[in-house]
Image: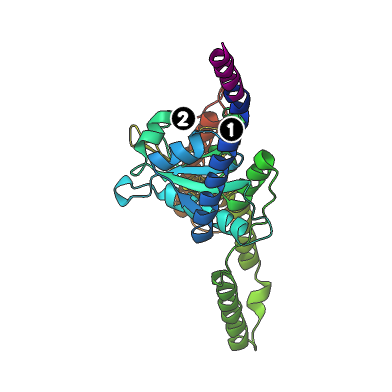
């Protein structure tokens, strides 16, 4: 009877102390994870993960830190130019976090390359790169944990805002100094100054209406094509479908655009403008009739063709727009 009572008491003590033991084991495991992640982060701002590391340090509980992961394909045979551009911006963001007061063990930055972790891509059902995901400390992924790359672009500043929304970690993006812009500006000013010095006795060209009209026209064309939007958002140059290999130069949404799309729109607007200029010249110049007719026909052709293309792009981006001209 005494042996049975002792056995029951022993079992009761074991089961009673099990939660405390399990909690201690959980805290130890979590501490080991944080220590390992901090060690990797101290060597490299963006931690490179393969399938095993992803399952151990991100997928498997327990975890009390967020992980921002860029899923990419950087190997040369993948020919993913957008991945390389996004990787540079992601590195800028991670370095800004690592070497600033925002550095904390509550968030880490990592990357998974397709050729090193294809099983992770398959596990998450992903078939495109680059893709940015936020893995919260607890709970499942939400829709807002997937970064809207096509809408927001991959500029480090945009990524920092998204990280702040998901983790409350404010990161001030610090870019390495780029002297290309100041050097180019200095060279341009030197050329202008040199030309002004050489023509110092005859500065009538500064009052030439055609020069100022052409300069203003170039500025307007650059601005209305979306160059400033590209500078702010940092969109990819184009998009390559990973399944078909088809390259898209025109974004399908009215809320975003590619860099190549900006160049196309700039060229089309310039062609339409040239058509209008030729029509005006044909109506007002003192050239002979034959040349004026040629200018008129050329102007009408440019105007009709390129305006039709512009309208076609507009229809593609604004689904349901009912009007078209020459082509659909």
Q: Position of residue 301 (x, y in %)?
A: 46, 42
Secondary structure under badge 1? helix
Q: Position of residue 276 (x, y in %)?
A: 57, 47
Of marks 2 and 1, which one's residue comes earlier in the chain? 1
Highlighted range, magenta: 1-13
Pick out the residue farthest to the left: 77
Which image quarter holds the N terminus? Answer: top right
Residue 33 is a magenta residue = no
Q: In this orientation, which residue lies closer to the viewer: 109 or 272?
A: 109
- Identify the mark at residue 326; answer none if there is no mark: 2
In terms of image quadrants, where is residue 318? Answer: top right
Q: Position of residue 253 (x, y in %)?
A: 55, 32
**How packed is label 2: few (under 14 Cα within 10 Å), some, or many (20 or more)?**
few
Q: Position of residue 288 (x, y in %)?
A: 49, 56
- Identify the mark at residue 240; answer none if there is no mark: none
Residue 11 is a magenta residue = yes
Left or right, 41 with reference to 224? left
Q: In this orientation, which residue lies closer to the viewer: 300 or 3?
A: 3
Vertical comparison of 290 with 247: above or below: below
- Identify the mark at residue 21; answer none if there is no mark: 1
């Amino acid at each position: 009877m005494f042996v049975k009572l002792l056995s029951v008491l022993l079992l009761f003590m074991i089961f009673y102390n099990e939660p405390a033991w399990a909690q201690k084991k959980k805290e130890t495991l979590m501490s080991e994870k944080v220590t390992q992640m901090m060690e990797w982060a101290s060597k490299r701002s963006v931690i490179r993960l393969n399938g095993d590391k992803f399952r151990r340090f991100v997928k498997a509980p327990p975890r009390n830190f967020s992980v921002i992961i860029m899923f990419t394909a950087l190997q040369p045979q993948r020919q993913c130019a957008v991945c390389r551009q996004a990787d540079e911006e992601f590195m800028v963001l991670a370095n800004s976090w690592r070497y600033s007061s925002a550095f904390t063990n509550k968030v880490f930055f990592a990357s998974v390359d397709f050729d090193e972790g294809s099983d992770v891509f398959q596990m998450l059902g992903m078939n495109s790169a680059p893709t940015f995901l936020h893995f919260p400390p607890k709970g499942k992924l939400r829709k807002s944990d997937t970064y809207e790359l096509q809408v927001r672009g991959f500029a480090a500043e945009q990524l920092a805002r998204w990280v702040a929304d998901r983790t409350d970690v404010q990161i001030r993006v610090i870019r390495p100094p780029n002297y290309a812009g100041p050097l180019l500006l200095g060279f341009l000013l030197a050329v202008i100054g040199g030309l002004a010095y050489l023509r110092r006795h005859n500065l009538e060209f500064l009052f030439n209406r055609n020069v100022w009209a052409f300069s203003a026209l170039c500025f307007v064309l650059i601005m209305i094509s979306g160059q400033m939007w590209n500078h702010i958002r940092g969109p990819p140059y184009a998009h390559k479908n990973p399944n078909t290999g088809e390259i898209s130069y025109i974004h399908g949404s009215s809320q975003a655009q590619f860099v190549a799309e900006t160049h196309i729109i700039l060229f089309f607007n310039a062609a339409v403008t040239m058509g209008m200029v030729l029509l005006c010249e044909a109506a007002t110049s003192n050239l002979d009739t034959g040349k004026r007719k040629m200018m008129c026909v050329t102007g009408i052709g440019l105007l009709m063709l390129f305006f039709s293309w512009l309208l076609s792009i507009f229809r593609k981006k604004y689904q349901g727009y009912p009007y078209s001209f020459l082509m659909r």
